[in-house]
Image (spheres, rainbow, N blue to C red):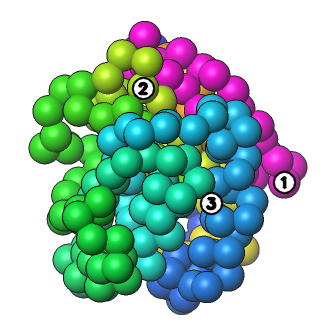
Amino acid sequence: MAHPSPRASVPPTLVDANRLWVDSRLRALVQRRVEAPLLLELGGPTHGGRALELGTGRRGTGLRLALDLFRAAAVDGVELHEPSVTACRAAVRDLGDRVDVQRGDATALTAATGSYDAVFGYHVLHHADAWRDAVAEAARVLRPGGRVYSCEMTARIVDSRPLRAVSRHPADGDRPTPAGLAAACTDAGLTLVGQQTRVAGCWTALVATRR
């Protein structure tokens, strides 16, 4: 499937305040109270399964949710930035050997094909230069019947002038859209289970399963 042509440019970033939001308590609260419950509604739990989270951040909120809300037995996390890996490990130390956090790239996972029952991604794709590769990797490491759970800010907000002014993202003008994310899942061999798009198209939640 042909990818949409990226725009020649996006609005400039004047002050990069990404970190203030990404690992904030408010962000974690939204993830716990809004995003994860909607993903659970769309895709159901993964009782006793092995899960993976792409881009854990520093707090490890998604790792806890995989265990507590989605009922996974164990969850691994990959995070690109080493300081965040260190902080996340400390944040989830109380979870013991049910959780393992490693430095890794969502677009080139080291896990074997068919390793996981679920893959979670909370706002990680729009930070990736090659976000479709991350979708393809998530599909690859899923077992047949396994599910991808994804929440994303879409191009409509990520590439808007107000957000770009205070939040740095890849400048290729090719951030996920609701339809583009669904299409990337289909291209990766996944079947859409459910999707909801809210906030005037600025945010989308999607669950897809491996055939």
Q: Amino acid at mark 3?
A: Val
Assign the C terminus to one quadrant of the image.
Answer: top left
Residue underneath mark 3: 158
Q: Which sits in the foreground, 155 or 189?
A: 189
Residue underneath mark 2: 146
**Label 3 vs label 2: CA separation?**
29 Å
> Which span of residues is magenta-colored?
187-211
Q: Earlier in the sequence, mark 3 or mark 2?
A: 2
Assign the N terminus to one quadrant of the image.
Answer: top left
Residue underneath mark 1: 199
Q: Earlier in the sequence, mark 3 or mark 1?
A: 3
Q: Is residue 27 left or right of residue 73?
A: right
**Residue 205 visible in the shown view:** no
Q: Is residue 6 left or right of residue 39?
A: left
Q: At 29% across and 60% down in the image, what residue appears?
A: 98
View extreme (right): residue = 200
Packing grade of label 1 (10 A; few <14, some 14-19, many >=20) is: few
Q: At 30% across and 79% down in the image, what residue appears?
A: 93
Q: Which sits in the foreground, 161 or 120?
A: 120
The answer to whether residue 115 is above or below residue 59 is above
Magenta residues, dominant SS class: strand
In this figure, what is the number of numbered marks?
Answer: 3
Q: At 16% across and 40% down in the image, what residue appears?
A: 111
**Label 1 vs label 2: CA separation?**
28 Å
The answer to whether residue 37 is above or below residue 149 is below
Q: Amino acid at mark 2?
A: Gly
Picture coordinates of residue 88, whole percent (x, y) = 33, 78
Q: Which sits in the foreground, 192 or 146?
A: 146
Q: At 70% across and 69% down in the image, what residue appears?
A: 30
